[in-house]
């Protein structure tokens, strides 16, 4: 607020200010402080940056009884008549102070007609009048008003700044409150000084004295038990959906709402994400030494991918709740999907399943697509009888013992599906041969036809004919030039490309060609039937319940010859 301080010191205060910020950031309080600075009786030059707080003007402003500081709620006084009354009162000189200060809270709620009526007065008010407009939504304030004001944006305070205000308030009011309780109270305020001070006042009534304990803060705020949240996250990380649901049931039996439990669980997962990313517990998350140690320990034992997935699923559950879904059902579904990726059909769930399989392999061996490593298989015949002691009348055991050595021999390469890789997160590999794409193509056609029937019918008799990296050539029969032109439409090409990416991964570029080898039916992947343009038109009309509209001839031109069947249609 350097600008305001200098303006007051030099007595160059502007006639209109716009204070913008979220709720509880001190906009109205700053407006009252500005009014006290302008009207303090002890100001040497008519105004001061340090109002005494003891003179008649300062005490009247603090009690909201000053006749020179008019606070108006624009949310309930937003009509033209209200603004007309304000304009009439502006004409009067200050009663006891040097300046009249009008504070319009929630200024964005004024109607368009009220703004128009207020505009001229705001631009040229009488001498000694200052307007302060406070709003949480600056985008709703007309531009003609914004450019007539000096704008100040109030940022949301940090947890430490709120804690400082709470400590200063507790000290002045002789309230005993431990640091961990102040930290919990500051974190729950979510960037609002007003919420923090209001909760502190509520805690005084709850505790019944001037001493507030951490347990009182947790009880008043309704914060879920940290141990219960920790147990829920551990159950999700261990893949124990039953334990996760039992934790939710325990919370519900205690009278807690499922939505609030979901919010607390989301906050716990966020804390784990921050600690895992930063490698330490930041000051804004610090609570008590014991709680910080438990948070750090859980951040070490829970997988980073599990935390990210849990955050995403809880966010989706809360979004469903806001859309009207049942809170407990949505949270139960999110916990089950997070703990059991096998019930989730999404690609991210598949990656989570693969990561869990790889994470279960011994640390001394490279994970091999979720299967036990080869050295573990070679240890099995350690207790087998030596080859030199075959049992009588039985086949020697030596060939059996030699079999694992053949598996582990370096000259025999494992199949491609069993080769170890160094990537921590599995990557979807693109099909490298044409035949794999030909085998996949019917699924692509089916997926396209599910959402876009016409586009699916266009590519029904196609198949891949060439591949070069991510460039795929799809062939049409030579008699399907009309369909090829339709498929080359940018929107249809994008639909097919998206379907192929969804099933095969990668970033494909699809091109179309007419191929003679596709003219004859038969063989795997060959077209089922070929149609002429006339046959395709009839097929579209029958399958899509369409009607052909003949082209109207221009005046003076003979009508085109159309067969009788089309004229009847």
Image: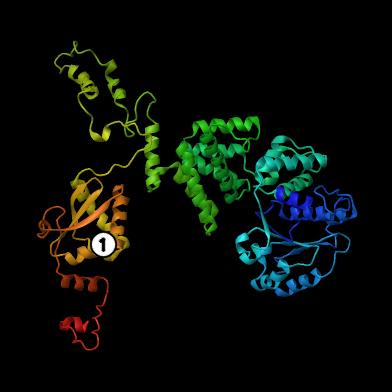
Q: Quadrant of residue 247?
A: top right
The residue nearer to you, when weighing 345 against 186, is 186
User: In the rendering, at what x and y percent does residue 52 appear?
Assistant: 86, 48
User: In the rendering, at what x and y percent does residue 163 appear?
Assistant: 71, 40
**Vertical relation: 3 (above or below) 453:** above
Left or right: residue 558 versus residue 152 is left
Q: Residues within 10 Å of mark 1 (few under 14, many from 20)?
A: many
User: In the rendering, at what x and y percent does residue 112 appear?
Assistant: 64, 71
Q: Pointer 1: what residue?
A: 456
Q: Quadrant of residue 479?
A: bottom left
User: In the rendering, at what x and y percent does residue 324 appear?
Assistant: 53, 59
Which residue is at 44% across, 46% downward?
A: 337
**Can you see residue 210?**
no
The residue nearer to you, when weighing 530 against 122, is 122
**Vertical relation: 517 (above or below) 434:** below
**Vertical relation: 560 (above or below) 433:** below
At mark 1, the secondary structure is helix
């Amino acid at each position: 607020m350097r600008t305001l301080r200098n303006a007051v010191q030099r007595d160059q205060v502007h006639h209109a200010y716009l204070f913008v910020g979220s709720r509880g950031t001190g906009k109205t309080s700053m407006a009252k402080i500005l009014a006290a600075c302008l009207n303090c009786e002890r100001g040497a030059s008519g105004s001061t940056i340090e109002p005494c707080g003891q003179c008649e003007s300062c005490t009247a402003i603090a009690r909201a009884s000053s006749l020179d500081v008019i606070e108006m709620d624009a949310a309930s006084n937003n009509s033209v008549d209200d603004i007309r009354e304000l304009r009439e009162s502006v004409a009067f000189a200050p009663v006891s102070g040097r300046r009249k200060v009008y504070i319009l809270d929630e200024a964005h709620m004024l109607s368009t007609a009220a703004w128009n009526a207020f505009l001229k007065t705001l631009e040229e008010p009488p001498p000694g009048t200052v307007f302060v407009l406070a709003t949480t939504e600056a985008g709703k304030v007309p531009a003609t008003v914004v450019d007539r004001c000096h704008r100040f944006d109030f940022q949301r305070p940090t947890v430490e700044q709120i804690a400082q205000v709470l400590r200063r308030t507790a000290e002045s009011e002789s309230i005993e409150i431990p640091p961990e309780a102040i930290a919990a109270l500051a974190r729950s305020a979510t960037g609002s000084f007003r919420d923090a001070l209001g909760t502190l006042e509520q805690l005084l009534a709850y505790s019944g004295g001037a001493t507030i304990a951490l347990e009182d803060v947790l009880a008043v705020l309704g914060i879920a038990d940290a141990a219960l949240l920790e147990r829920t996250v551990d159950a999700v990380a261990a893949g124990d959906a039953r334990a996760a649901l039992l934790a939710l049931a325990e919370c519900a039996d205690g009278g807690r709402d499922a939505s609030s439990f979901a919010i607390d669980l989301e906050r716990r997962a966020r804390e784990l994400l921050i600690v895992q990313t930063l490698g330490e517990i930041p000051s804004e998350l610090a609570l008590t030494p014991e709680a910080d140690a438990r948070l750090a320990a859980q951040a070490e034992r829970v997988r980073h991918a599990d935390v990210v997935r849990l955050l995403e699923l809880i966010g989706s559950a809360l979004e469903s709740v806001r859309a009207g879904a049942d809170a407990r059902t949505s949270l139960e579904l999110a916990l089950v999907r997070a703990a059991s990726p096998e019930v989730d059909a999404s690609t991210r769930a598949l990656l989570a399943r693969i990561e869990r399989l790889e994470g279960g392999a011994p640390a001394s061996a490279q994970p091999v697509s979720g299967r036990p490593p080869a050295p573990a298989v070679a240890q099995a015949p350690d207790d087998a009888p030596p080859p030199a002691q075959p049992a009588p009348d039985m086949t020697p055991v030596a060939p059996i013992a030699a079999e694992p050595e053949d598996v582990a021999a370096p000259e025999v390469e494992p199949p491609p599906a069993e080769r170890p890789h160094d990537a921590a997160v599995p990557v979807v590999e693109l099909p490298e041969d044409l035949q794999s794409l030909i085998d996949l193509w019917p699924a692509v056609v089916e997926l396209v036809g599910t959402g876009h029937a016409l586009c699916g019918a266009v590519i029904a008799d196609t198949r891949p004919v060439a591949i070069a990296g991510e460039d795929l050539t799809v062939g049409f029969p030579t008699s399907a030039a009309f369909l090829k032109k339709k498929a080359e439409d940018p929107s249809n090409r994008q639909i097919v490309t998206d379907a192929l990416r969804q099933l095969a991964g990668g970033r494909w570029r699809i091109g179309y060609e007419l191929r003679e080898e596709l003219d004859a039916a038969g063989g795997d992947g060959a077209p089922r039937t070929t149609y002429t343009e006339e046959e395709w038109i009839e097929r579209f009309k029958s399958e899509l319940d369409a009607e052909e509209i003949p082209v109207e001839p221009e005046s003076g031109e003979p009508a085109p010859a159309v067969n009788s069947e089309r004229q009847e249609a």
